[in-house]
Amino acid sequence: MKKEYRIKENKDFQKVFKKGHSTANRQFIVYVLKKEGQVHFRIGLSVSKKIGNAVVRNQVKRYIRQSMFEMKEWLEPENDYVIIARKPAADMNFFDVKKSLVHVLKLAKVLKKDYSLENK
C-alpha cells in the first residue's frame, strides 16, 4: 500500500481516536473518522507488543494492509481508519484476517453492502 494511504503522525491518530467512532470484534478495533474532501482513505495500524515478537507483529500489519488494499473499491474514500489488532489476530492467516476485517467494517457501516469475499 502506498505511503499516502497511511496515517503516520501521532496528531492524526489522536484526532481519529477523539473525534471518530469505534467498532470492534474479537480480533480488531476499528476507529473511523470522516474527513471531507479527502481524495482517498488512509489507514493507521496499531499492533501491540502483547501480540507477539516483531516478526508476528509485522506479519499481522502486512495482512491488514493487503486486506484493506484489496477492499479499496468498497471503502468510503473520505474516511481515516485506525485499526488496532487484538491478541487473537496473531494466530490468524491472511484469509482469516481479511474475513474478520470485512466483518468489523460491515459492523461499522463503512463497507459497501454489495461487497462479498468472493469479489476479490
Image (cartoon, grey):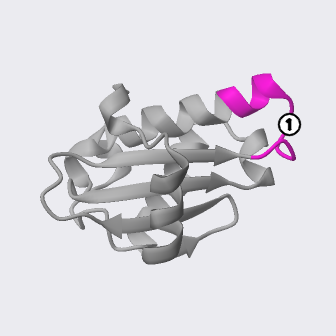
Direction from residue 80 to residue 46 in the image, left or right = right
Front one among 113 and 59: 59
Q: Which residue carries the number 1 mark?
A: 52
* Rendered-image quadrant of the C terminus: top left
Name above or below for residue 34 compared with residue 90: below
Residue 38 on image: x %, y %: 18, 53
Name the quadrant containing residue 20.
Answer: bottom left
At a point 21% along the width and 62% down the height, the residue shown is: 114
| Within-10-Å neighbours for mark 1: few <14, some 14–19, many 20+ | some
Direction from residue 106 to residue 85 in the image, left or right = right
Range covered by the magenta-colored residues: 48-58
At a point 17% along the width and 65% down the height, the residue shown is: 36
Residue 75 on image: x %, y %: 26, 54
At a point 42% along the width and 56% down the height, the residue shown is: 81
Front one among 110 and 113: 110
Q: Amino acid at mark 1?
A: Gly
Q: Is residue 110 magenta?
A: no
Residue 17 on image: x %, y %: 53, 68
Name the quadrant containing residue 47.
Answer: top right
Residue 22 on image: x %, y %: 52, 74
Name the quadrant containing residue 86.
Answer: bottom right
Direction from residue 54 to residue 40 in the image, left or right = left
Direction from residue 113 to residue 90 in the image, left or right = right
Name above or below for residue 115 compared with residue 39: below
At a point 31% along the width and 33% down the height, the residue shown is: 4
* SS type, badge 1: loop
* Rendered-image quadrant of the N terminus: top left
